[in-house]
Image: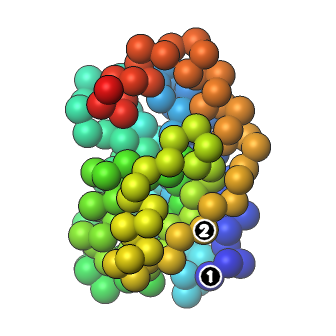
């Protein structure tokens, strides 16, 4: 599983950067099959681009993966550039994803992390400097949009 972590986080960051360039919230994700390293989905926060209340990076990643048998998710790792909010935590649990690798949780640390662990989902925070930097830049430039994104 850990053999795909660098690839998964690189893709998640690429997605976050794409979101930033689209004037969106720079949070990206990637879903990788643990057995063979196949990339099943990738996406980024599209709330501003699509006028959506719910299209966070993790949700966009799952949406872009498309419909799959429930058993497929159970052999996957979800990579996300930022600690997953309660909504995204719920999606991870709903589909039985057993592992979540988080780019950083300094900018925002959701109670979802400990909830994922308590429900049997392994979480790993990699403290990725790129993820921290892009979020800090976004928050400095657009604080009102950041607070809207996290529901404050």
Q: Residues within 10 Å of mark 1 (few under 14, many from 20)?
A: some
- In this rendering, would 51 be left or right of 36? left
Residue 14 picture quarter = top right
Q: Which of 123 and 59 is in front in this view?
A: 123
Residue 89 picture quarter = bottom left
Q: Which of marks 1 and 2 is nearer the N terminus?
A: 1
Residue in the image at 50% along x and 77% along y: 122
Residue in the image at 71% along x and 78% along y: 3
Q: Where is residue 119 in the image (x, y as percent from the top left)?
A: 34, 78
Q: Nearer the viewer, residue 145 or 152?
A: 152
Above or below: residue 87 compared with residue 44: below
- In this rendering, would 21 be left or right of 147? right
Q: Mark 1 points at which residue?
A: 1
Label pair 1/2, CB-CB below 8 angstroms: no
Q: Name the residue under label 2.
A: 124
Name the quadrant of the N terminus: bottom right
Q: Which of 24 and 107 is in front in this view?
A: 107
- Label 2 sits on a secondary structure element that is strand
Q: Where is residue 88 in the image (x, y as percent from the top left)?
A: 34, 54
Residue in the image at 46% along x and 41% along y: 44
Name the quadrant of the C terminus: top left
The answer to whether one can see residue 62 in this image is no
Residue 149 picture quarter = top left
Residue in the image at 69% along x and 60% along y: 126
Q: Where is residue 42 in the image (x, y as percent from the top left)?
A: 48, 53
Which is closer to the viewer, label 1 or label 2? 2
The answer to whether one can see residue 56 in this image is yes
């Amino acid at each position: 599983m850990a053999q795909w972590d660098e690839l998964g986080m690189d893709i998640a960051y690429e997605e976050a950067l794409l979101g930033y360039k689209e004037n969106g919230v720079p949070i990206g994700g990637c879903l990788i099959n643990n057995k063979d390293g196949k990339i099943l989905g990738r996406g980024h926060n599209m709330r501003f681009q699509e006028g959506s209340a719910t299209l966070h990076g993790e949700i966009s990643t799952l949406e872009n993966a498309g419909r799959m048998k429930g058993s497929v998710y159970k052999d996957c790792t979800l990579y996300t550039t930022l600690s997953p909010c309660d909504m995204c935590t719920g999606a991870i649990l709903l589909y039985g994803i057993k592992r979540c690798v988080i780019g950083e949780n300094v900018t925002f640390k959701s109670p979802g992390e400990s909830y994922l662990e308590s429900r049997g989902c392994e979480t790993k925070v990699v403290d990725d400097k790129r993820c921290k930097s892009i979020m800090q830049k976004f928050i400095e430039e657009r604080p009102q949009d950041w607070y809207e994104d996290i529901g404050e």
